[in-house]
Amino acid sequence: MNPQELANLAHLRRARDLIDREYARPLDVPTMAQHALMSPAHFSRQFRAAYGETPYSYLMTRRIERAMALLRGGKSVTDACMAVGCTSLGSFSSRFSEIVGETPSAYRSREHHAVAAMPPCLARLHTRPTRNTPSKKPRSRNREAAGETAA
Protein backbone atom coordinates (compact mmCIF):
# COMPACT_ATOMS: atom_id res chain seq x y z
CA MET A 1 0.00 0.00 0.00
CA ASN A 2 1.42 3.36 -0.99
CA PRO A 3 1.34 6.48 1.23
CA GLN A 4 -1.62 7.99 -0.67
CA GLU A 5 -3.74 4.86 -0.14
CA LEU A 6 -2.86 4.87 3.56
CA ALA A 7 -3.87 8.52 3.81
CA ASN A 8 -7.18 7.79 2.04
CA LEU A 9 -7.85 4.91 4.41
CA ALA A 10 -7.23 7.18 7.40
CA HIS A 11 -9.69 9.72 5.98
CA LEU A 12 -12.27 7.00 5.39
CA ARG A 13 -11.80 5.78 8.95
CA ARG A 14 -12.47 9.31 10.18
CA ALA A 15 -15.79 9.35 8.29
CA ARG A 16 -16.69 5.86 9.56
CA ASP A 17 -15.94 7.00 13.11
CA LEU A 18 -18.27 9.97 12.53
CA ILE A 19 -21.04 7.57 11.50
CA ASP A 20 -20.44 5.37 14.55
CA ARG A 21 -20.46 8.37 16.88
CA GLU A 22 -23.22 10.51 15.33
CA TYR A 23 -25.56 7.83 13.95
CA ALA A 24 -28.62 9.48 15.55
CA ARG A 25 -27.93 12.80 13.81
CA PRO A 26 -29.14 13.49 10.29
CA LEU A 27 -26.10 12.48 8.23
CA ASP A 28 -25.84 12.60 4.47
CA VAL A 29 -23.09 11.54 2.10
CA PRO A 30 -21.79 15.10 1.47
CA THR A 31 -21.33 15.61 5.23
CA MET A 32 -19.54 12.27 5.58
CA ALA A 33 -17.40 13.06 2.53
CA GLN A 34 -16.45 16.41 4.01
CA HIS A 35 -15.06 14.66 7.08
CA ALA A 36 -13.06 12.36 4.78
CA LEU A 37 -11.78 15.36 2.80
CA MET A 38 -13.19 13.93 -0.45
CA SER A 39 -15.87 14.74 -2.98
CA PRO A 40 -19.15 12.88 -2.33
CA ALA A 41 -18.86 10.65 -5.42
CA HIS A 42 -15.21 9.76 -4.77
CA PHE A 43 -15.96 9.17 -1.09
CA SER A 44 -18.82 6.78 -1.91
CA ARG A 45 -16.64 4.77 -4.30
CA GLN A 46 -13.71 4.62 -1.90
CA PHE A 47 -15.88 3.77 1.11
CA ARG A 48 -17.52 0.89 -0.75
CA ALA A 49 -14.16 -0.41 -1.94
CA ALA A 50 -12.71 -0.28 1.58
CA TYR A 51 -15.68 -1.51 3.66
CA GLY A 52 -17.82 -3.49 1.22
CA GLU A 53 -20.97 -1.37 1.53
CA THR A 54 -22.06 2.16 0.73
CA PRO A 55 -21.81 4.87 3.39
CA TYR A 56 -25.60 5.12 3.70
CA SER A 57 -25.91 1.35 4.02
CA TYR A 58 -23.27 1.37 6.76
CA LEU A 59 -25.12 4.18 8.56
CA MET A 60 -28.43 2.32 8.43
CA THR A 61 -26.82 -0.91 9.63
CA ARG A 62 -25.34 0.94 12.62
CA ARG A 63 -28.74 2.51 13.32
CA ILE A 64 -30.45 -0.87 13.21
CA GLU A 65 -27.76 -2.32 15.48
CA ARG A 66 -28.43 0.40 18.07
CA ALA A 67 -32.20 -0.03 17.66
CA MET A 68 -31.85 -3.76 18.35
CA ALA A 69 -30.19 -2.98 21.69
CA LEU A 70 -32.94 -0.49 22.57
CA LEU A 71 -35.67 -2.97 21.65
CA ARG A 72 -34.02 -5.66 23.78
CA GLY A 73 -34.04 -3.14 26.61
CA GLY A 74 -37.82 -2.72 26.36
CA LYS A 75 -38.16 0.51 24.34
CA SER A 76 -41.14 0.77 22.03
CA VAL A 77 -40.54 0.46 18.29
CA THR A 78 -41.43 4.13 17.75
CA ASP A 79 -39.07 5.30 20.52
CA ALA A 80 -36.24 3.15 19.19
CA CYS A 81 -36.86 4.44 15.67
CA MET A 82 -36.65 8.07 16.75
CA ALA A 83 -33.73 7.49 19.15
CA VAL A 84 -31.49 6.17 16.38
CA GLY A 85 -32.20 9.05 14.01
CA CYS A 86 -34.83 7.57 11.70
CA THR A 87 -37.72 9.89 10.95
CA SER A 88 -40.06 7.46 9.20
CA LEU A 89 -41.39 4.49 11.15
CA GLY A 90 -42.34 2.71 7.93
CA SER A 91 -38.89 3.07 6.37
CA PHE A 92 -37.27 2.05 9.66
CA SER A 93 -39.45 -1.08 9.91
CA SER A 94 -38.76 -2.04 6.29
CA ARG A 95 -35.00 -1.62 6.68
CA PHE A 96 -35.03 -3.41 10.05
CA SER A 97 -36.86 -6.38 8.50
CA GLU A 98 -34.50 -6.40 5.52
CA ILE A 99 -31.37 -6.47 7.70
CA VAL A 100 -32.50 -8.52 10.71
CA GLY A 101 -34.98 -10.85 9.03
CA GLU A 102 -37.94 -10.08 11.30
CA THR A 103 -40.06 -7.05 12.13
CA PRO A 104 -39.02 -4.75 14.98
CA SER A 105 -42.10 -5.66 17.02
CA ALA A 106 -41.40 -9.40 16.60
CA TYR A 107 -37.76 -8.83 17.60
CA ARG A 108 -38.85 -6.80 20.64
CA SER A 109 -41.37 -9.42 21.82
CA ARG A 110 -38.85 -12.29 21.57
CA GLU A 111 -36.85 -13.34 24.66
CA HIS A 112 -33.16 -12.37 24.68
CA HIS A 113 -31.88 -14.23 27.75
CA ALA A 114 -28.57 -15.25 26.17
CA VAL A 115 -27.74 -11.67 25.24
CA ALA A 116 -28.62 -10.44 28.74
CA ALA A 117 -26.15 -12.92 30.24
CA MET A 118 -23.27 -11.80 27.98
CA PRO A 119 -20.88 -8.95 28.68
CA PRO A 120 -21.86 -5.94 26.54
CA CYS A 121 -18.79 -6.25 24.30
CA LEU A 122 -19.71 -9.83 23.36
CA ALA A 123 -23.40 -8.99 23.00
CA ARG A 124 -22.54 -6.29 20.44
CA LEU A 125 -20.35 -8.73 18.52
CA HIS A 126 -22.92 -11.54 18.43
CA THR A 127 -25.97 -9.37 17.71
CA ARG A 128 -24.39 -7.16 15.04
CA PRO A 129 -26.76 -7.21 12.08
CA THR A 130 -25.56 -8.28 8.66
CA ARG A 131 -27.39 -7.85 5.42
CA ASN A 132 -29.11 -11.08 4.54
CA THR A 133 -30.98 -10.14 1.40
CA PRO A 134 -31.21 -13.03 -1.04
CA SER A 135 -29.88 -12.47 -4.51
CA LYS A 136 -32.61 -11.71 -6.97
CA LYS A 137 -33.04 -13.74 -10.12
CA PRO A 138 -32.42 -11.72 -13.29
CA ARG A 139 -35.59 -10.81 -15.10
CA SER A 140 -35.92 -11.56 -18.74
CA ARG A 141 -38.63 -10.82 -21.26
CA ASN A 142 -37.65 -13.95 -23.11
CA ARG A 143 -38.18 -16.94 -20.79
CA GLU A 144 -36.30 -19.31 -23.08
CA ALA A 145 -33.23 -17.08 -22.92
CA ALA A 146 -33.36 -17.19 -19.14
CA GLY A 147 -33.63 -20.99 -19.17
CA GLU A 148 -37.20 -21.06 -17.85
CA THR A 149 -39.88 -23.16 -19.47
CA ALA A 150 -43.54 -22.27 -19.71
CA ALA A 151 -45.84 -24.41 -17.58
Image (cartoon, helix red, strand yellow):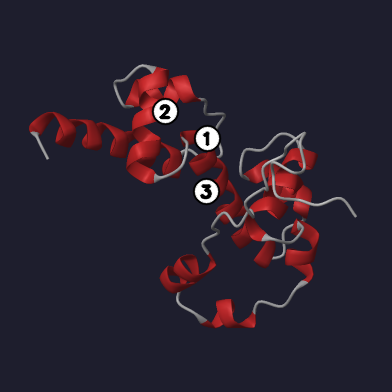
Query: Residue at 24% across / 37% down in the picture?
Result: 9
What distance separates the C-alpha of mark 2 from that of mark 1?
A: 9 Å
Vertical side of 36 occupied by 49: above or below:
below
Q: In the displayed orientation, state which residue is furthest to the right.
A: 151
* Residue wearing tag 1: 56
Position of residue 16 measured from the top left corner of the image (x, y, whole percent):
37, 39
Q: Which of disc 2 and disc 3 is earlier in sequence?
A: 2
- Amino acid found under the numbered disc labelled 3: Arg
What distance separates the C-alpha of mark 3 from that of mark 1?
A: 10 Å
What distance separates the C-alpha of mark 3 from that of mark 2?
A: 17 Å
Query: Residue at 32% across / 41% down in the picture?
Result: 50
Residue 73 can be seen, yes or no = no
The kind of secondary structure element at disc 2 is helix
Q: Quadrant of residue 129?
A: bottom right
Q: Residues within 10 Å of mark 3 (few under 14, many from 20)?
A: many
The answer to which of 94 and 16 lies nearer the viewer is: 94
Left or right: residue 20 versus residue 78 is left
Vertical side of 100 occupied by 20: above or below:
above
Nearer the viewer's eye, disc 3 or disc 1? 1
The answer to which of 14 and 12 lies nearer the viewer is: 12
Q: Which mark is residue 62?
A: 3
- Amino acid found under the numbered disc labelled 1: Tyr
* Residue wearing tag 2: 44
Labels 2 & 1 near each other (Cβ < 8 A): no
Query: Residue at 68% across / 46% down in the picture?
Result: 95
Residue 53 can be seen, yes or no = yes
The answer to which of 105 and 8 lies nearer the viewer is: 8
Q: Quadrant of residue 44?
A: top left
The kind of secondary structure element at disc 1 is helix
